Image (spheres, rainbow, N blue to C red):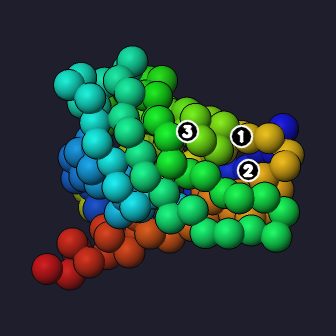
Amino acid sequence: MIHAAASRELLASREDVWAFLSEPHRLADWWPGVTAVQADRRGFAAGARWAVVGDNRPSLIRKPNMSGALLVMAVEPPSRFAFHLTGERIDAELRLVALGPERTLADVTVAGPSLIGLRRSLLPQKALARLYDLCQTAAEE
């Protein structure tokens, strides 16, 4: 099992970041490898099961498969979202801490099989970079 983590300050309030994250289809905007999401009727709630479609880019080691299901493991507004991606067998958690009126610390941790190696160990940094860009764009508007 590989564990990886990253933290980044986002230029938005925790409530604004949470409002963005709580829309299931937005996962494709910030989670690397996911291109589309279809949430079940429970939406953004623990126990929900979403269908996810990935980019499935070829790999020298194995065929990546971000497609499959996302199981929502925990939702604790406005501070914690945990999920499991069945295609990649990745457990992920996002935690948000308010640093000020327009600043939020975001922490992402992932755990997955060692076969997914270095490429997936960069998932937290990539996810936070995308989330930062989305928050920065909203702050400039």
Q: Position of residue 1 (x, y in %)?
A: 84, 38
Q: Residue at x 35, y 63 (%)?
A: 29
State the mark number for residue 29. Answer: none
Q: Element at badge 2?
A: strand
State the mark number for residue 85. Answer: 3
Quick one: label 2, few (<14), some, or many (20+) residues within 10 Å?
A: some
Q: Position of residue 48 (x, y in %)?
A: 35, 24
Quick one: label 3, few (<14), some, or many (20+) residues within 10 Å?
A: many
Q: Element at badge 3?
A: strand
Q: Element at badge 1?
A: strand
Q: Where is 27 relative to 92, above or below?
A: below
Which image quadrant is residue 10 in?
A: bottom left
Q: Residue at x 48, y 57 (%)?
A: 54
- Say whether disc 2 or disc 3 marks the residue closer to the N-terminus: 2
Q: Is residue 61 left or right of residue 34?
A: right
**Residue furthest top as drawn:** 47
Q: Is residue 12 left or right of residue 106?
A: left
Q: Where does label 1 land, which residue?
A: 111
Q: Is residue 45 left or right of residue 5?
A: left
Q: Residue at x 36, y 35 (%)?
A: 50
The residues tagged by marks 1 and 3 sit, at their Cα atoms, a distance apart of 11 Å
- Asked whether 50 or 82 is in front, the reply is 50
Q: Position of residue 129 (x, y in %)?
A: 50, 70
Q: Where does label 2 land, which residue?
A: 4
Which image quadrant is residue 77 in?
A: top left
Q: Position of residue 11 (x, y in %)?
A: 34, 68
